[in-house]
Image (cartoon, rainbow, N blue to C red):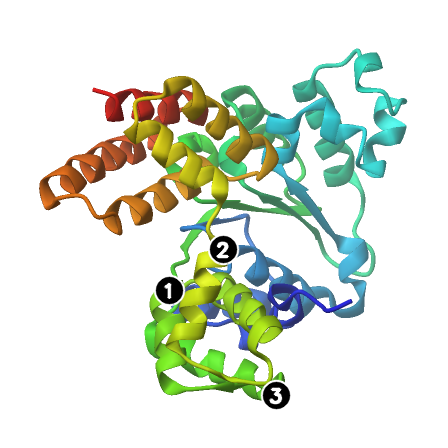
Amino acid sequence: MKDIWTVKYRPSNLDEVLGNEESVDMIRRLVRSKNLPHLVFHGPENTGKSSTAFAMAREIYGEGQEHNLTYFNASDFFEQGKRYLVRDKRFLRIIGTDDPSKISKSVIAIFKEVVNEYASMAPIDADFKIIFIDNAEAFNSDAQHALRRIMEKYTTTCRFVLSTTQPSKLIAPLRSRGLQLFFTHVSADKLAKFIREVADKEGLSVSEDGVDALGYHANGNVARALHTLQVASLHFRDSNIGSQEIYECTLKERSENVMHLFQAAVSKDIIEARKAIDDLILEEGMSGQEILLKLHAMAASSNESDAVIAGWVIRIADADLCLTDASNERIQLEALVAGFCQ
């Protein structure tokens, strides 16, 4: 079975992290000083926040990373709830059952207990351990206040690294507990160089216009570039991969549910649009921001007049603004659909 390239080419140390030089350099200096504070990584999806956190842990712990780094995904906790808890064997001892209907404690109570336990454990052959929490914007206010107190309580034995695409959703006391570092997508020249290096390692022939087309499609998103290039390698391994081949691969990446949502919104079919939203969030696991980005791309590439496209884009932009402070993405997406139907 082939490795997924986003995993295969994940950086193993800070020197291999692509882009975000200022943030990575700051982390490198903190690691060398052996005085790591709590950290808050923020920036768009697929900008290297998680990869940098894991690379940082490898720099600090070496072979002991597995014992001193704990990873949690906040969206798993608070969006999937008890269904997720019974699937993760780490929580079995705490919840005492693999049947979600038999869990008597609330998700927030289990979250507090789990994080308290991991934070209180002494590090192995290290000064402190790291708890990395991804998608921290999924925490509700109660969970964030609880996390803030835990961070204060165990600051001598544990460092927290929070990663989020929406820092405004984090309460001010939580943001102030950590050093905030911004991550963004990589520049076009760095991405092009990286694409050529991966193509050489995989024995692929990619033309310059193919590299340009892949860079245009990825728009600085390394994960998207790797995914598309891997798809191209499966379909065109024995051919020269150019712009046409990249275009054909990007068509395969389009979600049918996004197309369904867009078509339902345009045709004023709210029932079908709501079904598509359910499929995108629950089945495909997309965030509200990801859905809006794909809707924007579909609107911009449609054959409608400039005036109609401009109206759609304005509604999508308004929905994106609302998502910044929203506690429920589904409500904002349904409001967007209603706006399309006006």
Query: In the image, residue 18 lies at what x, y percent?
Result: 48, 72
Which residue is drawn at the image coordinates 54% and 31% (left, top)?
A: 279
Numbered disc in front, either 2 or 3: 2
The Cα atoms of the two marked residues, 2 and 3, are separated by 23 Å
Q: Residue type at mark 1? A: His
The answer to whether residue 162 is seen in the rendering is yes
Query: In the image, residue 245 lies at what x, y percent?
Result: 45, 73
In front: 258, or 221? 258
Q: Quadrant of residue 185?
A: bottom left
Q: Which mark is residue 253?
A: 2
Q: Label 1 neighbourhood size at 10 Å, few (<14), some (14-19), many (20+)? A: some
Residue that numbered label 1 is attached to: 217
In front: 262, or 288? 262
Q: For the C terminus, which image quadrant?
A: top left
Residue that lies at the very extreme toward the left in this rendered image? 307
Residue that numbered label 3 is attached to: 203
Q: Name which of mark 1 and mark 2 comes first in the sequence.
A: 1
The answer to whether residue 19 is seen in the rendering is no
